[in-house]
């Protein structure tokens, strides 16, 4: 293939057009749903697209994680570009642990070039002490710094001064952890994140609905929800062992009492895990102030689809095509 033909193909694939099904679902009346890809060290292009095909008819966007367990996998930017090329609306995760500010800014500009508008920006978990081979966490920027950087680019300003030729249509999010707030608690950190430019907040895995309700009551009381949308992360747990592993690897996750025992005692733990997730989705959708949910992919995307269908929130519609 001649170079000119190759460049023309690239131009046809990457037009810079940004899909907006995710932000439109948040701004609409329907409860927004997203799901994460499961990116393992050996995942290839075909496996990425297979996961996307399973999930794509049931969700408004597909989230692309950024080495959450410090295991290398295909570049998130490459995966998000692949999804956009196939007309799925990606949410690109970027963490501050694995890149310095130059690399992070480059990835933001690369996202713009590939037509990727949704960003979930975070500090990133500390590297485990037993990580092998040893690696070094960078943390040149913090999460709020990264949000502010993305917002500056979104506003069309070059970080070195002057104006960018185009203003990226970034839709910027960051993460927070739900907890049981004490009386008088004020969500100051969330206010700072909103002021930095965050347009949505995604809560870490929370399966404890009582804690989530009390947390959201405080956000409603603080009148913060005019500043950003809130999504909560949930997951279909296929077994009691899976639940224990998630709780161990995600120390900020919230599990209600009795959930693991319910999975242990179930005749079909996988089926029970899907039913629990569906029940949680219905409850989350009824909590004032929550605009959507993100479903974590623990290895089988079909469980996510099953939970969504059983919840009744989405009937396998073609949300992104």
Image: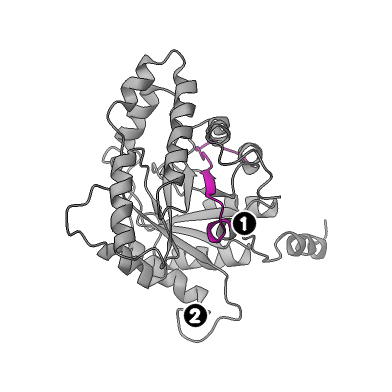
Q: Residues within 10 Å of mark 2 (few under 14, many from 20)?
A: some
Q: Which residue is depicted at the point 50% across and 31% down?
A: 299
Front-most of 232 and 13? Answer: 232
Q: Position of residue 23 (x, y in %)?
A: 56, 60
Residue assigned mark 1:
21
Residue 166 in the figure: left or right of residue 221: right
| Mark 1 and mark 2: Cα distance apart in space | 28 Å
- At 49% from the left and 28% from the top, the residue drawn is 274
Tell me the quarter of the picture where residue 185 sits.
bottom left
Marks 1 and 2: which is nearer the front? Answer: 1
Residue 40 lies, in percent from the top left, at 50, 37
Percent coordinates x, y for residue 230 in the rendering? 42, 56
Task: Report the residue marked by disc 2.
Answer: 158
Q: Nearer the viewer, residue 34 or 113?
A: 34
| The one of 89 and 215 positioned closer to us in this rendering | 215
For the point 36% across and 15% down, the residue is: 265
Figure check: 271 above or below 200: above
């Amino acid at each position: 293939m001649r170079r000119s033909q190759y460049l023309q193909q690239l131009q046809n694939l990457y037009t810079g057009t940004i899909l907006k099904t995710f932000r439109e679902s948040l701004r609409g009346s329907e409860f927004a749903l997203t799901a994460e890809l499961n990116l393992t060290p050996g995942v290839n292009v075909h496996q990425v697209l297979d996961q996307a095909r399973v999930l794509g008819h049931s969700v408004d966007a597909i989230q692309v994680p950024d080495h959450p367990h410090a295991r290398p996998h295909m570049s998130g930017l490459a995966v998000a570009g692949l999804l956009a090329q196939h007309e799925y609306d990606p949410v690109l995760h970027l963490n501050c642990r694995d890149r310095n500010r130059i690399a992070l800014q480059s990835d933001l500009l690369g996202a713009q070039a590939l037509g990727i508008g949704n960003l979930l920006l975070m500090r990133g978990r500390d590297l485990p002490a037993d990580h092998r081979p040893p690696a070094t966490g960078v943390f040149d920027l913090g999460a709020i710094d990264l949000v502010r950087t993305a917002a500056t680019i979104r506003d069309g300003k070059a970080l070195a001064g002057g104006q960018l030729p185009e203003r990226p249509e970034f839709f910027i999010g960051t993460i927070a952890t739900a907890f049981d707030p004490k009386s008088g608690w004020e969500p100051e950190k969330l206010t700072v994140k909103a002021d930095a430019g965050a347009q949505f907040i995604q809560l870490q895995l929370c399966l404890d609905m009582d804690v989530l309700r009390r947390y959201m009551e405080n956000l409603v009381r603080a009148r913060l929800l005019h500043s950003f949308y809130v999504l909560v992360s949930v997951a279909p747990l296929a077994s009691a062992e899976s639940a224990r592993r998630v709780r161990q690897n995600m120390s900020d996750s919230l599990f209600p009492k009795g959930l693991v025992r319910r999975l242990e005692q179930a005749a079909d733990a996988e089926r029970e895990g899907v039913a629990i997730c569906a029940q949680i989705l219905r409850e989350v959708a009824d909590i004032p102030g929550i605009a959507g949910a993100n479903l974590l992919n623990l290895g089988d995307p079909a469980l996510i689809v099953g939970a969504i269908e059983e919840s009744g929130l989405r009937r396998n519609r073609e949300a992104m095509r």
